[in-house]
Amino acid sequence: MRIISFNCEGIKNATENGFFDWALAQDADVICLQDIRASESELADPVYTPDEYFSYFFDGYDPEKEKGGVALYSRVPPKAIITGLGFPVADSQGLCIQADFDKISIASLLVPEGNADDDSQNVKFKFMEDYLHYLDKQQRKRREFLICGTWQVAHRKIDVANWRDFQSTSGFLPPEQAWMDEITGPLGYVDTYREVDRESGKFTWWEDDRLRDKNMGWRFDYQMATSSMRHRVLNGGIYTGEAFSRHAPVIIDYEWELSF
């Protein structure tokens, strides 16, 4: 099973930049998109709903903020599609869509951005708190979970260039790192990319082209899986050959046959 996760910062712009031309050649079983910045009614063009996939959108898009919305594409029809997480921020902004298959659920997640200098950071912290409670409840279900998306946190020092300069910056604040510790500790989730590549300098987001050229970036995008998936991770990579947005697609192969 091959999963691609990508924050497109606008599905229309990413498409114009060649994302679907690239993605359709990767033979992925599931493609998870974040921050599509479009309502589902705007995506009637077949370019956004490739014949090879069943296409699902959760379009809590806020035109004023020009942020939000997630999508999930699957070669195999899921048993069910679940939108939202059951708390206001996630559901009003379209931050999560989940596809349930036989014995596994795959989600496309967009954690809200924060700024340490304004109230958006409090919104982010509230989301993080509510999401921990959500994940804790999910532990009671007898199935695997694979959560693909933009987590808006560089978990370790190796996940951000020049980390010493960003200790007071949203995305690398101590409470945010502690949140990731909770997810990968007591909650038992695995950062699947780090199962196959533990080197530094592997980033998924760069603020601009100049910093991208210098590879001065952050690793904000993860595929997090329940603990028993750890030994099913086969290969992983971050595609930087083309720039479809300021984020780079994350591609992970798993020893798993997707079925419904």
Image (cartoon, helix red, strand yellow):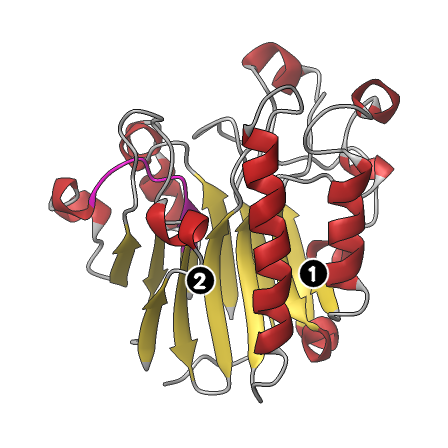
**Which residue in the protein does label 2 denote?**
85
- The correct choice, above or below, for 50 with respect to 164 in the image is below
The residue drawn where x is 47% and y is 63% is 107
Residue 121 appears in view: yes
Q: What stretch is highlighted in magenta?
A: 32-39
Question: At label 1, which amino acid type do we have?
Answer: Thr
**Which residue in the protein does label 1 denote?**
192
Q: Quadrant of residue 163?
A: top right
Observer-side mark, 2 or 1, equals: 2
Question: At label 2, which amino acid type do we have?
Answer: Leu
The residue drawn where x is 34% and y is 40% is 36
**Whole-percent x and y of residue 77?**
29, 76
Instruction: Using the image as rendered, state which of residue 225 and residue 251 is in the foreground.
Output: 225
The residue drawn where x is 59% and y is 76% is 137
Judged left or right of residue 206, residue 198 is right
Identify the mark nearer the N-term, 2 or 1. 2
